[in-house]
Image: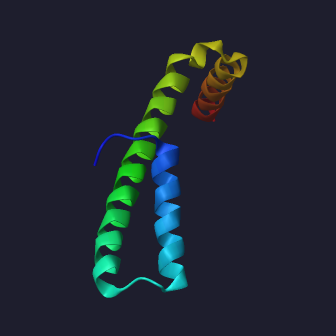
Amino acid sequence: MTKSSFATDFKELEKLVEEFEKGEIDIEQGMIKFKKGLGLARSLKKRLSQVENEIVKIKEEFEDLDPDSEDKKEIAVLKKTKSAQK
């Protein structure tokens, strides 16, 4: 499969699903399109996973820019300290 855009592959997968839902595909074409659909679904899932991982990395990289992040860390330390004192 050549590298194409996520949106293009998703539209193609949607089109295949619609064809199957209509039930107008013969058995030979159905097998070919089913296999193509599975390949598209796998590729889309892989790309989504990569994007999710990249978002996590970006968020971690810029965590220091979140003014609430330091407050959250300080609150967590205070809670641990209070628990240890009991």
- Residue nearest the viewer, comparing 17 with 68: 17
**Left or right for 41, reference 11:** left
Q: Is residue 31 left or right of residue 54?
A: left
- Residue 75 is drawn in which quadrant? top right
Residue pictured at 52% horizontal, 63% vertical: 14
In the rendered view, would you say 74 is above or below 30?
above
Q: Nearer the viewer, residue 50 or 62?
A: 50
Vertical arrangement, residue 40 with respect to residue 48, above or below = below
Q: Quadrant of the C terminus?
A: top right
The image quarter containing residue 49 is top left
Query: Which residue corresponds to the image point at 35% horizontal and 51% vertical from the top-left?
Result: 43
Q: In the image, what residue occupies the spot 55% across and 25% down?
A: 59
Q: Position of residue 78 (x, y in %)?
A: 66, 24
The one nearer the camera, 30 or 78, is 30
Foreground residue among 12 and 52: 12
Q: Position of residue 56 (x, y in %)?
A: 49, 32
Q: Is residue 19 above or below residue 44?
A: below
Q: Is residue 19 above or below residue 61?
A: below
Q: Which residue is located at x 53 percent, y 55 percent?
A: 11
**Residue furthest toward the top?**
65
Coordinates of residue 35 in the picture (x, y in percent): 29, 68
- Number of labels in the image equals 0
Q: Position of residue 73 (x, y in %)?
A: 62, 23
Q: How is the image coloured?
A: rainbow
